[in-house]
Image (cartoon, grey):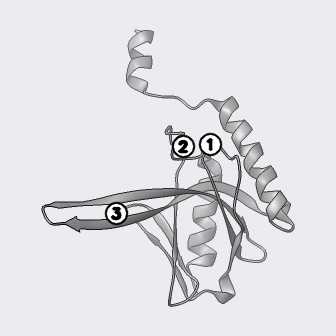
Amino acid sequence: MGFFRKLWKGPEVDLEKSGENAKKMRQMFDRVVENGGEYRLISGYTEDVSRFNYGFVHGSRRKVGSLIVGWNEESQTIVVVPTVPDLSGCGEPVYYRRADILKAYRNRYPTDAFVIYPDSRGYIAINAYDWLEDESLYIYVSQEEELAAFTKFFLERFAKK
């Protein structure tokens, strides 16, 4: 009976690998964000879907970008650091201060995303997850508790104006 229970349960989180990646995320974030230790962290991703139409061929291409997302409740700031799923490097941080943004909301369809409009010309949609197994596209980290805290912060403090 134990064999079938494991079979139907599906994949399980490798807590050791998840913990190592959480440490890497923290180190990387602290390296590029001033006072990075004052922020709580989650991993997320953003998508760029480009559509194409070549006569009889219709379709779309999807590009996924991994993110380290930090938030500070006291300063009501979200910092987004672009990275890659294996955490081998990162880009420059982008700061979203609540007082400086045009609007923010949670979009549940077609994906569950936290959307921030810093101005009328652009936006970022942060997709976040408890855990995703595909290490080629997403950072391998289990973050159920942190995701719940970020969601609460975003909805109570950030999405309101």
Give SS at disc 3: loop
- In primary-sequence order, the first of circles 2 and 3 is 3
Residue that appears at 37% across and 23% down:
8
Give SS at disc 2: loop
Locate residue 113, reporting x and y percent: 47, 65
Q: Residue furthest front?
A: 55
Q: Amino acid at mark 1?
A: Val
Residue that appears at 73% across and 50% down:
25
Residue 141 is labelled as: 1
Residue 99 against residue 56 in the figure, above or below: below
Mark 2 lies on residue: 131
Residue that appears at 65% across and 53% down:
146
Q: 156 or 139: which is nearer to us?
A: 139
Mark 3 lies on residue: 110
Residue 83 against residue 11 in the figure, above or below: below
Locate residue 7, reporting x and y percent: 40, 18
